Image: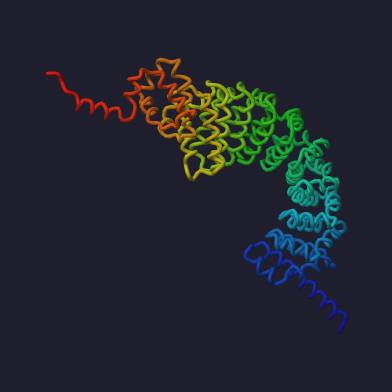
Amino acid sequence: MSQRQVLQVFEQYQKARTQFVQTVAELATRPQNIETLQNAGVMSLLRPLLLDVVPTIQQTAALALGRLANYNDDLAEAVVKGDILPQLVYSLAEQNRFYKKAAAFVLRAVGKHSPQLAQAIVDCGALDTLVICLEDFDPGVKEAAAWALGYIARHNAELSQAVVDAGAVPLLVLCIQEPEIALKRIAASALSDISKHSPELAQTVVDVGAIAHLAQMILNPDAKLKRQVLSALSQIAKHSVDLAEMGVEAEIFPVVLTCLKDSDEYVKKNAATLIREIAKHTPELSQLIVNAGGVAAVIDCIGNCKGNVRLPGIMMLGYVAAHSENLAMAVIISKGVPQLSICLSEEREDHIKAAAAWALGQIGRHTPEHARAVAVTNVLPLLLSLYMETESSEDLQVKTKKALKNILQKCTYLPALEPLLHDAPPNILKHVVGQFSKVLPHDSKARRLFVTSGGLKKVQEIKAEPGSLLQEYINTINNCYPEEIVRYYSPGYSDALLERVENYQPVL
């Protein structure tokens, strides 16, 4: 065989390898092909090609493996069991930028599925190499490495700590200062994933100056970047008063309130989440948000969106109102109660209704004035119907019951209570009757209205256990009226009266 023929054989072999990896990489983009590729043993065929002498074949083989591993955890598991990770880690340190991006993509695709698979990546020594890639001159390599590190860190505190211990955090903070928007997004996302697990991990992010850089990007025009920035700040602020105060000191107010009007739903949601995580800690932080116009801005945001986007805003109002009478009144003055009532009536998801019910309970539980502000929106019958609805989730029933109890124990606005006399079950009814027993002895106008509206008649129809708290309340109400009036409205009195008429012998 001549030299030319030998070269032709090698050339054909290279073309065949190239065509094979390119075809597999292309097929792996379509879900319907995955099972067939898996059954054909494609993993074992791709593995030797990761060490091919031709760089483009190496890169395409890695890309194909990444796409397969990304699809499901079985294929990701096959990458681990096929002993492919050590090859990737070795090549990640040695090869060109194209290969580094592809190799980091495989690590990310494997690590995203479960803590066990992410741990396998840590165990093969990938973190140190990925951290080195964060210092690469190529922004695409940095981005791929940051993405893989974030996917590993997001699972649990132990994996997140491993990422921190590898020295990733200072370099991720440098990455958010780079000019490339895509790199900023992924680095901010990775910082969010590291921060979320514990106060200690969040503190490591804070200690390298991340908050100031994140705060500066709140007004960046890129919506996807804003989502990640707001998420990272939320994950830091949620852990403690000190961490929340650091966000406030970075002057995120009133700037963050503009995000509540953003056209991007996730920006709105993440902004409301950040405000919620700060408001929940102390009355002072909630007051600061009120002073910045945050309550009114959140209420407007809730009114302009639907579904889960509303949820953090609803909860934020509940947290603010829970702290004190004055803060609850700030929510009332900003017309938060009607908006929460709308959420309660028009949302379909039980967990959103439950949050709205909880927030209304936090507003109404302080004083009769607060309770009246809630009751006048006619929300009490709605809370009652959701509590009694058999299809309501257990959490919704618990939250509506608690809200009703909180509001009823303070409510002295009787017109709002009266409809509940007719529909409430005994465990709610005792709170309703209890409020009438507190108000009627001291209000003659209310006593008259209670008779003419049918309230007194309804009370006489209630079957209470002798000696029970409910019976005591009924006795207190009955003592507000002449005995003959009480008797007149008692069940069976009209029959007894007719019987007396029939038996009466007129004097002729």
Tally the marks: 0
Q: Is residue 286 left or right of residue 93?
A: left
Q: Quadrant of residue 224?
A: top right
Q: Is residue 497 left or right of residue 262?
A: left
Q: Nearer the viewer, residue 259 or 205?
A: 205
Farthest residue, direction left: 508
228, above or below 44, in the image: above
Provide residue 480's location: percent of width, then percent of height: 41, 18
Provide residue 476's location: percent of width, then percent of height: 44, 21
Q: Quadrant of the N terminus?
A: bottom right
Q: Quadrant of residue 320?
A: top right
Provide residue 189's location: percent of width, then percent of height: 73, 44
Q: Nearer the viewer, residue 230 or 153?
A: 153
Q: Quadrant of the C terminus?
A: top left
Q: Quadrant of residue 506?
A: top left
Tell me which colouring the rendered structure shows.
rainbow
31, above or below 477, in the image: below
Kindly identify the residue that appears in the image at 55 percent across and 31 percent down. Answer: 360
485, above or below 298, in the image: above
Provide residue 237's location: percent of width, then percent of height: 73, 35
Q: Nearer the viewer, residue 112 or 1?
A: 112
